[in-house]
Image (cartoon, rainbow, N blue to C red):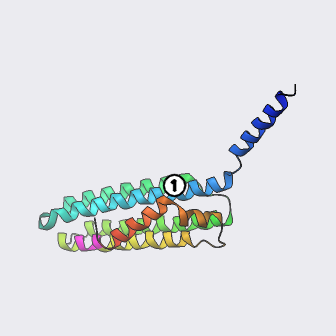
Amino acid sequence: MSRIAPLLLLAALVLAGCGGDDGSSASEDYANGVCSNLSTWVTDVQGTVQNLTDQGLSITRDDIQQAYDDAKQSTDTMVNDIEGLGPPETEEGNQAKSELDDLATELRQQLDVIEQAINSGGGVASIAATVTTAVSTAANAVNSTYQSLQNLNPPGELQDAFENSDDCNSLQDQIANLRSGGG
């Protein structure tokens, strides 16, 4: 009997240790998920912009339509995936969700701008200029949202997760690259 008690105590301690960091892990998982999804979106948009740039003067309306379709699909996927993450049930989590909802609205508005340009009957050069402006505006919106997530108020665990996440640090580098026109 005396040998069983220490084993039970050890098992209880091990099991207690397994679930002891749930709050931190939920915040870190959420921050990593958000930044990973945003990072995928940035990578997709960079690829789309690069494909258009590579076309140079031979770019066609069909090329721009395909780029729009790709950007729309990428945006829809990112928004749906982030919505599926569900923020931690805290004031910070609600604020993060609000910031991301606003970002989704802004990105969809930029897609609408591109779609209107494509349907306007304007020249390819004019449409390409609109696409460039819309992508720049979208990149600025992603950057602004990311900055807001790093400065959540009241500061706490979720804010720390966004500040310290490797996925979020990589995202910040990607946003800077996209905003500078890099590929």
**Magenta span main SS:** helix
Give the answer, above or below, for where 140 lies relative to 77.
below
**Residue 31 percent location from the top left of the image:** 55, 59
**Residue 127 percent location from the top left of the image:** 23, 70
Q: Which residue sits at x=38%, y=56%?
A: 74
> Quadrant location of residue 1?
top right
**Residue 113 percent location from the top left of the image:** 34, 70
Outermost residue to the top: 1
Decide whether residue 129 is among the magenta residues. yes
Decide whether residue 171 is among the magenta residues. no
Q: Nearer the viewer, residue 129 or 35?
A: 35
Residue 89 visible in image: yes
Horizontal arrangement in the rendering, residue 156 relative to residue 78 (left or right): right
Q: Which residue sits at x=51%, y=58%?
A: 34
Residue 60 visible in image: no
Q: Which residue sits at x=56%, y=53%?
A: 85
Q: What residue type is labelled 1?
A: Gly
> Quadrant location of residue 10?
top right
Horizontal arrangement in the rendering, residue 76 relative to residue 86 (left or right): left
Horizontal arrangement in the rendering, residue 111 relative to residue 21 (left or right): left
Q: Which residue sits at x=72%, y=40%?
A: 14
Residue numbers of the magenta segment = 128-132
Residue beneath disc 1? 33
**Residue 83 percent location from the top left of the image:** 53, 55
Outermost residue to the right: 1
The quarter of the image holding the C terminus is bottom left
Q: Is mark 1 on a helix, strand or loop?
A: helix
> Quadrant location of residue 24?
bottom right
